[in-house]
Image (spheres, grey):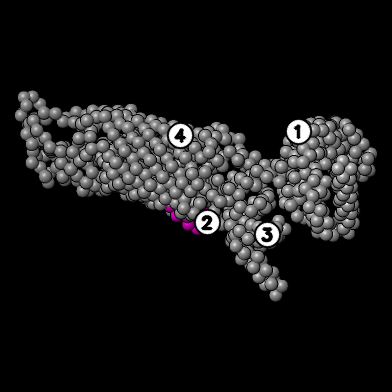
Amino acid sequence: MYKLAGGVIIFLLLLVSKTEAQSTMSFKTIDSISYNYYQKQNWDSLIYLKNQLDGSEVDYFYLRMRFGIAYFEKNKFNKSTEEFKKALEFNALDSLAKEYLYYSYLYNVKEGEAKLVEPERLRKKQIIDAVYVELGPTFSNNNKTNQTAIIDNSQGIYEQIDLSKDETYLHLGLKHQLTKRISVYHGYSNIGINRTKQMLINGSVVTDNYYLKQQDYYINVNWYLGKGFSVTPFFHYLYVDYEKLNAYEELPVGSDHYSFYKTTTTLKDYVVGLSIDKRMGIFNLNLNGMYSSINYTTGTQLGLALTYYPFGNTNFWGSTSITKAGYKSPSFSTQKGIGGPPLVFGQSLGVSLFKKAWIEGNYTLGTLANFSENNAFVVYNSTDKIVNKWNISLTIPINKKIEAKLGYSFYNYQSSYMSCDTEETFTIKPTKYENQSIIGGIKWKL
Amino acid sequence: METLRKTIFICICFLFALHSKSQNNAVLSAFEKSYTYETNKEYAKAINEIKLLKDDGYECCLRLGWLNYLNASYTESVANYTKAIGLMPYSVEARLGIAYPLSALGNWSLIISQYNEILKIDPKNSTVNYRMALISYTNKDYINAQKYIEISANMYPFDYDSAVLYAWTKLQLGKFNEAKVLFTKALMIKPNDASALEGLKLIK
């Protein structure tokens, strides 16, 4: 009965208007009500009280801590950050406020800010901070769909198709926290692609199965400048190596006699660029630019992305990006099936599930040819073009140190093959196929 | 005409003196009553006595600061002490006083800034040096703790609090011989003291 009466009195006290509350609620009232709510873990009421007191002169460390913890418990990390920052203005030495502020930043995807306030007891002096491993196969229906293309549609005297088939992918990466503000991520990747080249000569098909091997080294340096600004220079080196069969017509031209020889191709490609991020409340704005030399073609790319956390936490988030790419090689941009310089649109959405696991989906529309994304961590350097792709991934924390990730991606490809109508003219004929990849990964925080 | 002027002037002076005397009596009476109420722990009444004076002078602000602190009206106490400091910027007592409500509110950064202000006015203030040493020690800043406690301990060599804090600071800095001497001194001041005995045990 007494409890009920107490509750009614508190409720009536809070019913007064905001202005009235500011002028009439004394320190003692505010302190006792807020302490009462805090002890009972009545977070919603504490937040309500906080809103009532907005602009009040009663302001002190313990009050800010109570409000901060209320917001933190309700996963409103933007708000809790503000309260703990204010609490630390009152008591810069308080370790509990520092730790809460650190986690508020961390759970609000503000790693740069979090590192700056990381409590001493959580700080580790080690060379490697995290290890990343991801691997998985890619299954392609290209061979099934297009292996008879040159026979079925044969019109000319010579036809040639190069089919990209199943792939394997492996990536090993390390993260180093050099200083509070600077972290480095670098890694090695190995991609293997089974390919088949078919040549239709004089009505018979010559087939060459070959293996394309790609080895990559990727590095980025993230430098947190403060006030939500960070810059990330990055570099991706790609070493591509394969050997495939070629045919040439023996002289005189028109003899219809062909010889075959194998040629080895080695590509030493790279992408270099810079990304600038600015965090503003629930938004993160990213501007990135890069220069690439891929498949004998140089290109530039300029992208803008906006990531948003509408609830001030990672329970739900989204990211929208638009990228403009341009290439210097005129032959590249005018090739049939590629079109002009591509404009690529990307949309991602993420939802937090049970026990801090989360699911993320994204869709990309636009021609991905010699295209890079995620600060050039991913480079689409295939000679076949992706016209759209979508991906869904599930991330599950196994324990405090290990996080497992499983992703499925679907790619719609456009390719082409060559058909020589006469000795001197040839046409490029389009083909389509789909790839599906399953990538599993582990992130191990040391 | 001259005589009339003189008479008016004398009358005004007399009335002014009379008013001042009654005012002074009211102030003295209010302060006296407030002490009585304070002794009886009737802090709200004590506050009211001073408030009725409607005097924004240093003494009233300081007194209200203290009484509001005792009444657990900490933000009001801080406001009164702040006003007193504004009126008398060199007042060490007001700055020492404001530390009480500030600590109750948990606003330790403001306490440290007040203590630093006091040390600018009075660098050898033993109370503040001791308190700064304690704050530094609590925050594991043993170098600064030593800097402050040295002053306090040298001014009051036979003070238990200074001796035992000095000893613990030396122990944390790895100066075991000096810590041993200081723990022994603390035991001379306060025989069988648990903290000093614990410190000595750690050294052995």
Residue indicated by mark 1:
B144
Q: Label 4 vs label 3: CA separation?
A: 49 Å
- Amino acid under disc 3: Met
Residue indicated by mark 3:
A25
Nearer to us of marks 3 and 2 is 3
- Is disc 2 on the same chain as disc 1? no
Mark 4–mark 3 contact, CB under 8 Å? Answer: no
Question: For residue A15, which quarter of the picture?
Answer: bottom right
- Amino acid under disc 2: Lys
Q: Point out the tag, 4 or 2, that comes first from the N-terminus.
A: 4
What crowding class fits label 4: few (fewer than 14 Cα within 10 Å), some (14-19), or many (20 or more)? some
Q: Label 1 vs label 2: CA separation?
A: 44 Å
What chain does badge 1 belong to?
Answer: B
Q: Which residues are magenta?
A: A350-356
Q: Decide: is A268 above or below A32.
A: above
Residue indicated by mark 4:
A232
Secondary element type, mark 4? strand
- Amino acid under disc 1: Asn
Where is the N terminus of chain A found, in terms of image quarters?
A: bottom right
Nearer to us of marks 1 and 3 is 3
